Image (cartoon, grey):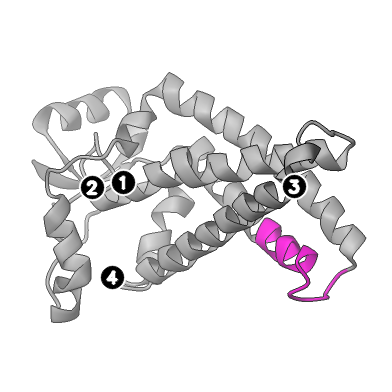
Amino acid sequence: MSLHRVMIYSHFERLWHWLQALAIIILLFTGLRIHGVHHVMSFEMAVTVHTTVALSLLLLWAFATFWLFTTGNWKHYMPTKQGLWRVVRFYAYGIFKGEQHPYRKAYWRKHNPLQAAAYLSLKIGIFPMIWISGLLYLYMVWGGTWFASVNFPSAVAFVHTLAAYLTLLFLIIHLYMLTIGEGFFKHVKPMINGFDEVDLSKVEEAYLEADEPEHIQDDMPDGS
């Protein structure tokens, strides 16, 4: 295995990432207005923007899910126990001692075990809580009466708000993690230009150089 700078984030993946981030920030901001936390905009405008952005995000998630399964990128999000506790120990203790990160990205697995588990939990746990509860709430707001007899609106609102705060917590942790180690820009840059430093086997290196030469760069700072 040797270290190379390789494009591991496609154009669509980067577009999906930044549009999703922008949508989540807007939804959190408008959601806080709907709950009366701030009064930067009118309640009516907050509801309109929140609903429009939420439906747009649902459409983006549908495209992203299709892309993940048709391209095989879903494999990067499958959790594994291999190396998990070394990564957990690093973030809980080693990082404060100046230790090196125990995980080196591979072409076939760009997320470390802890990242994969966190992203998978977000995609199959928190996000479904948000869109299912959001769609149910829209159904009731637009005239649905199916759940009225069991006071369902309160339960739906609670689940939706809980999922929103869990998403906010994830966002805060995500931003914090970007500030440690090699620095914020070093962590963000791959999601801007698509390239990151990964370990390649001889077979992977030969494949990229022969079939996708534009996806591999030989300007590693350490001369690799």
| Badge nearest the viewer, 1 or 4 | 1
* Residue 103 shows in this picture: no
Amino acid residing under circle 1? Ala
* Residue 157 at x, y percent in the picture: 69, 52
Q: Residue furthest bottom?
A: 97
Are the residues tagged 2 and 1 within 8 Å (C-beta)? yes
* Quarter of the N terminus within the rendering: top left
Q: Position of residue 154 (x, y in %)?
A: 71, 52
Residue occupied by mark 1: 117
Q: Provide the residue designation for mark 4.
A: 182
Tell me the SS state at disc 4: loop
Q: CA distance from mark 2 to mark 1?
A: 6 Å
Question: Dot 2, crowdedness within 10 Å: few (<14), some or many (≥20)?
Answer: many
Give the residue at mark 2.
113
Please state the extent of the stretch shown in magenta in the rendering: 26-41
Side of 43 where 220 appears, left or right: left
Q: Residue 2 placed where, x, y %?
A: 11, 44
Choose mark 4 or mark 3, whichever is in front: 3
Verify whether residue 111 appears in magenta. no
First in sequence: mark 3 or mark 1? 1
Of labels 4 and 3, earlier in sequence is 3
Q: CA distance from mark 3 to mark 1?
A: 31 Å
Q: Nearer the viewer, residue 118 or 158?
A: 158
